């Protein structure tokens, strides 16, 4: 488990995450995939530092599980690795 971060550091990372997400909207129309990487970085920072964002993310994943699993794997979240290992060992649901 990680040691708790200083509240000022958490707030700074939340603000930086928000700036990256807004920047993704600005850079998005330009040629190239730059906006995707900015959005992903901002999302990661916000999900790591905000309890409310984590709760909303869990609700979104329940509603759209395929998209949520894809994003979790791209973010290398430990929960995604556990689910992937469990699915690989047991097999997909309904396969039996």
Image (tube, rainbow, N blue to C red):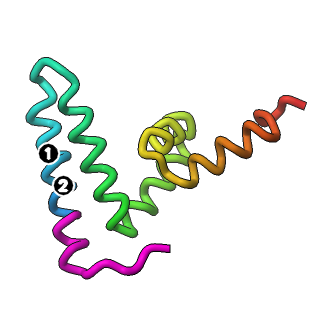
In this rendering, position of residue 27 left or right of residue 48? left
Q: Which residue is mark 2?
A: 18
In this rendering, position of residue 87 left or right of residue 32? right
In this rendering, position of residue 5 left or right of residue 90? left
Observer-nearest of 94 and 71: 71
The spot of residue 11 in percent (x, y) is: 20, 71
Circle 2: element type? helix
In this rendering, the answer to whether 34 lies above or below 79 is above
| Crowd tier of the residue under label 1, counting other residues whose Cα lies within 10 Å: few below 14, some 14–19, many 20 or above | some
Is residue 7 inside the magenta stretch? yes
The spot of residue 49 in percent (x, y) is: 32, 67
Q: Which residue is mark 1?
A: 22
At 36% from the left and 58% from the top, the residue drawn is 47
The magenta segment is 1-13
At 54% from the left and 40% from the top, the residue drawn is 69
Considering every residue shown, the one lying at the far right of the view is 96
In the rendered structure, are the residues bearing label 1 and label 2 in contact, judged by CB atoms less than 8 Å apart?
yes
Is residue 67 inside the magenta stretch? no
Disc 1/disc 2 C-alpha distance (Å): 6 Å
The spot of residue 84 in percent (x, y) is: 65, 41
């Amino acid at each position: 488990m990680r040691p708790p971060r200083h509240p000022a550091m958490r707030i700074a990372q939340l603000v930086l995450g928000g700036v990256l997400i807004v920047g993704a909207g600005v850079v998005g129309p330009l040629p190239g995939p730059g906006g995707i990487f900015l959005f992903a970085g901002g999302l990661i920072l916000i999900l790591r530092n905000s309890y409310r964002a984590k709760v909303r993310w869990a609700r979104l994943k329940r509603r759209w599980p395929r998209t949520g699993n894809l994003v979790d794997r791209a973010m290398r979240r430990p929960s995604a690795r556990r689910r992937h290992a469990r699915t690989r060992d047991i097999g997909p649901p309904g396969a039996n």
